[in-house]
Image (spheres, helix red, strand yellow):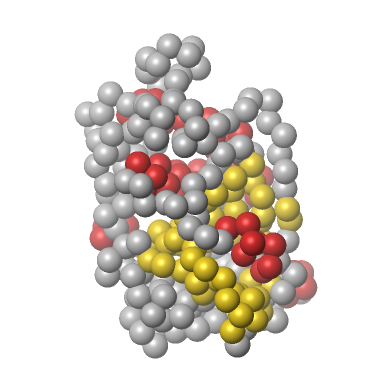
Amino acid sequence: MKRIVLVCGVVFCALTSIAFTDNGGNGKNKKTEKDFPVLIAKNSSKTTFARQQIDSVYSLLEVAGFNLSKDVFEKAYQGYVYLLSQNKIPKPGILTIADYSKPSSEKRLYVIDVANARLLFNTYVAHGKNSGASSAESFSNAPNSNKSSLGFVLTGETYVGSKGYSLRLDGLEAGINDNVRSRAVVIHGSSYVDAARARNGVMMGRSFGCPALSWADYKPIIDEIKGGSLMFMYSDDLNYNLRSKVLTADFEWPSETI
């Protein structure tokens, strides 16, 4: 696991603490040629500024060097903004991304401090054994499927169970991941996820659907994200991309303090 603290030349404030302004500070949008896929209304006066904001935060995070694509970050961050605008995130400021479009031998879990534009953790994470071998290719919300679920979830409370110190999750997308709690899909430590496997070219072990972490990583990450922060479990899955009401939300990008 890497814990990263990036000191940025520009201080980025959380959506919960400051109104958005453009680089000129006058609240007006500047035109851009960049064509990001956005969730906001196509006729929104904030569309251009939203694109600039996403680009700015992504650049400040410097996550491209950690192999987090802009496309995945855009989806996660725009979902974060939308759910925050709907008062769905009890603990704003932290955004966790599990990028299941990557194989398990890559560091595909990212914990981002969006309040300060910092990447806090980048490490390995398991997927469900019935989702695929080295890569996750199939996903489910069904009980006993032993597959990973996709989409936006909230972190819940911690507990000590058969896997030790663990963190419960609550799905925010009906029919897509709203069974994660009843399925006991949780974050926990495991012996089948570790850096040595990656170094030796061995795929990580698989869970019953849980985003399991290594014993070296799980506790500090759980302590950082527990209690109502947002997590986005992503794959380039056509079914999810079409069905997700978060990814297809039509909303006005906020220009006032939320």
Q: Residue at x 69, y 72 (%)?
A: 214
Q: Is residue 38 above or below residue 141?
A: above
Query: Picture coordinates of residue 19 (x, y %)?
Result: 44, 26
Query: Picture coordinates of residue 166 (x, y %)?
Result: 59, 75
Q: Residue at x 62, y 28 (%)?
A: 11
Work out whether residue 131 can be spotted. no
Q: Is residue 229 left or right of residue 163?
A: left
Asked where in the image residue 165 lies, by quadrant, the reply is bottom right
Q: Residue at x 60, y 38 (%)?
A: 117
Q: Residue at x 38, y 66 (%)?
A: 171
Q: Is residue 98 above or below residue 13?
A: below
Asked where in the image residue 159 lies, by quadrant, the reply is bottom right
Quadrant of image for the N terminus: bottom right
Work out whether residue 23 can be spotted. yes
Front residue (pair 122, 235) = 122
Q: Is residue 204 above or below residue 117?
A: below
Front residue (pair 194, 26) = 26
Query: Picture coordinates of residue 149 (x, y %)?
Result: 41, 71
Quadrant of image for the C terminus: top left
Front residue (pair 177, 157) = 157
Q: Is residue 62 left or right of residue 36?
A: right
Instruction: Say how many tags the image has.
Output: 0
Query: Picture coordinates of residue 167 (x, y %)?
Result: 55, 71
